[in-house]
Image: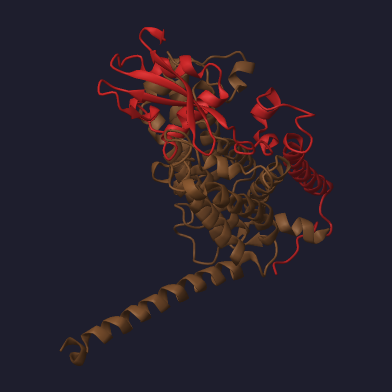
Chain colours: A red, B brown
């Protein structure tokens, strides 16, 4: 067991103040992550919301925000086809890899960001041979396609 | 109360934090590297504000091209200094300002919830420093064993990540993971979504049953491991459980490996010398017994009566 540090006997008042200030900020820092975590699950964003200014600069206030707490059973699945008509993941037409979650990043964008279609189109615009497909799929025992939409990003949405 | 402060203020073995430093900055470089290599596409002047991190929007400041390049250079410099173990406070500050700024500019390729933990670690490390005592250029010429690390950075990071991990379990519990069959639904997802291509449709006949098992297992790990890490007798098992959990997630689902780097690294931070020795001994024993059985098998094959 390491020696337990304590305030040195005869330490100056400045050293004492510094020690207590350090310990208080430590408790504050720890307390914030617990409050943040509670706010996003048990308290359901009562104190602050995800994406607000506070959580943008104090990231540990977001700790209770979880990705897969709820999994939707109606989803939009993006894919792309080239001239041969075979479906590929979105990552096949994006310049940059998101290492380890290439297609998932594109899929989650459609699930979370209402503006994602325009943003992703902007990034594959330079490929006129590409058609972007958005298929609404119901996840049941036998998943089925409810609807499908083809988009040529250089021309706008097609029926 | 003195014991409580000792948890953050006493000296400790410097190796876990040094290993975490390399793993953490390495993981960060792997995560941001591809987008920095294609800088113009991801952060060039034509790129809109990212939607995930809004700090620059609140400041009503859209950095010009030169400022974006400066952010990129800052991120690269910070990550490099962090891996090499030079000036840990400066490394964290540069990596924090650079990577956070880049995420504000454009995060279409890099956004993940793991970034909340990354920013927290970098903010904290900028203030607390440390982690460069060993396995670093700074510690190169020091005598072995002469350096002792402070527990402040190490335990602050570990405790926060453990809190995050534990409350992720609480959130799942309150969202009905025990009754809704969440993983069962996820295992039925089609291609190009969350599952790795090899796992799509693989479990179809028994996805619901397997999903139930995975729901319970996930809750057990997320709620149990953070507690077990603080119990000396369970610590080495908790470390193995945490590592196994992330290997399983990354191999089934398309999630950024950054999560694994962070949480397995954080579990390592909580390990004391005894736990590290216990895990190393267990691994060595397994390797030794396998090697011994291989040798026995090859000796058996080489016996002339069997060859005849």
Query: Furthest-left residue in view?
Result: B308
Q: Nearer the viewer, residue B289 or B45?
A: B289
State which quarter of the image contains the C terminus of chain B.
bottom left
Relative placement, left or right, of B169 versus B99 is: right
Q: In the image, is B169 to the left or to the right of B53?
A: right
- Residue B112: quarter of image: top right
Question: Picture coordinates of residue B6 (x, y %)?
Answer: 74, 59
Q: Is B231 left or right of B252, judged from the image as shown?
A: right
- Number of numbered callouts drawn: 0
Q: Where residue B130 sits in the image (x, y, percent)?
A: 58, 50
- At a point 57% along the width and 25% down the height, the residue shown is A112
Q: Residue A78's quadrant in the figure?
A: top left
Furthest residue to the bottom? Answer: B305
Quarter of the image where the N terminus of chain B is located? bottom right
Q: Position of residue A8 (x, y in %)?
A: 80, 58
**Residue B78: image location, x then y, percent:** 48, 37
Q: In the picture provided, is B23 more to the left or to the right than A152?
A: right
At 57% across and 60% down in the image, what residue appears? B241
Residue B14 appearing in the image: no
Which residue does the image show at 73% across and 42% down from the upper left?
B174
Closer to us: B121 or B135: B121
Q: Residue B24 versus residue B87: which sits nearer the camera?
A: B24
Whether residue B150 is visible to the viewer of this picture, yes or no, is yes
Residue furthest to the top in view is A155
Residue at 81 percent across and 54 percent down: it is A11
Give above or below for A9 relative to A67: below
């Amino acid at each position: 067991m390491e020696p337990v540090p304590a305030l040195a006997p005869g330490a100056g008042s400045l050293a004492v103040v510094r020690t207590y200030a350090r310990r208080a900020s430590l408790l504050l820092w720890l307390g914030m992550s617990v409050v943040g975590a509670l706010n996003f699950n048990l308290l359901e964003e009562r104190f602050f919301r995800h994406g607000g200014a506070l959580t943008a600069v104090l990231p540990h206030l977001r700790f209770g925000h979880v990705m897969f707490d709820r999994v939707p059973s109606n989803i939009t699945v993006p894919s792309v086809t080239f001239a041969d008509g075979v479906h590929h993941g979105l990552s096949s037409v994006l310049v940059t890899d998101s290492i380890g979650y290439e297609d998932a990043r594109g899929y989650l964008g459609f699930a979370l960001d209402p503006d994602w279609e325009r943003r992703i189109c902007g990034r594959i615009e330079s490929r006129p041979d590409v058609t972007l497909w958005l298929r609404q799929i119901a996840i049941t025992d036998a998943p089925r396609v409810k609807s499908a939409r083809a988009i040529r990003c250089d021309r706008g949405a097609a029926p | 109360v003195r014991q409580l402060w000792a948890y953050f203020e006493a000296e400790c073995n410097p190796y876990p934090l040094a290993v975490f430093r390399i793993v953490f900055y390495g993981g960060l470089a792997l995560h941001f590297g591809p987008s920095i290599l294609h800088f113009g596409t991801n952060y060039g002047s034509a790129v809109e504000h990212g939607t995930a991190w809004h700090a620059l929007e609140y400041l009503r400041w859209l950095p010009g091209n030169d400022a974006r390049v400066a952010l990129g250079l800052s991120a690269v410099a910070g990550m490099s200094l962090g891996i090499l173990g030079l000036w840990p406070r400066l490394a964290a500050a540069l990596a924090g300002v650079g990577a956070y700024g880049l995420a504000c500019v454009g995060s279409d390729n890099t956004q993940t919830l793991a970034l909340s933990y990354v920013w927290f670690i970098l903010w904290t490390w900028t203030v607390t420093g440390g982690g460069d005592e060993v396995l670093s250029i700074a510690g190169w010429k020091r005598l072995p064993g002469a350096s002792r690390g402070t527990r402040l950075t190490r335990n602050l990071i570990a405790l926060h990540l453990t809190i995050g991990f534990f409350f992720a379990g609480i959130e799942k519990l309150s969202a009905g993971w025990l009754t809704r069959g969440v993983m069962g639904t996820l295992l039925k997802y089609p291609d190009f979504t969350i599952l790795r291509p090899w796992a799509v449709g693989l479990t179809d006949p028994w996805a619901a049953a397997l999903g139930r098992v995975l729901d319970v297992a996930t809750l057990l790990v997320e709620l149990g491991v953070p507690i077990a890490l603080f119990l000396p007798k369970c610590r080495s098992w908790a470390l193995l459980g945490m590592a196994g959990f992330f290997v399983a997630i990354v191999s089934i689902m398309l999630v950024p490996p950054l999560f694994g780097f962070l949480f397995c690294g954080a579990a390592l931070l909580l390990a004391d010398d005894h736990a590290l020795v216990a895990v190393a001994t267990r691994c060595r024993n397994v390797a030794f017994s396998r090697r011994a059985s291989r040798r026995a098998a090859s000796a058996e094959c080489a016996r002339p009566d069997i060859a005849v």
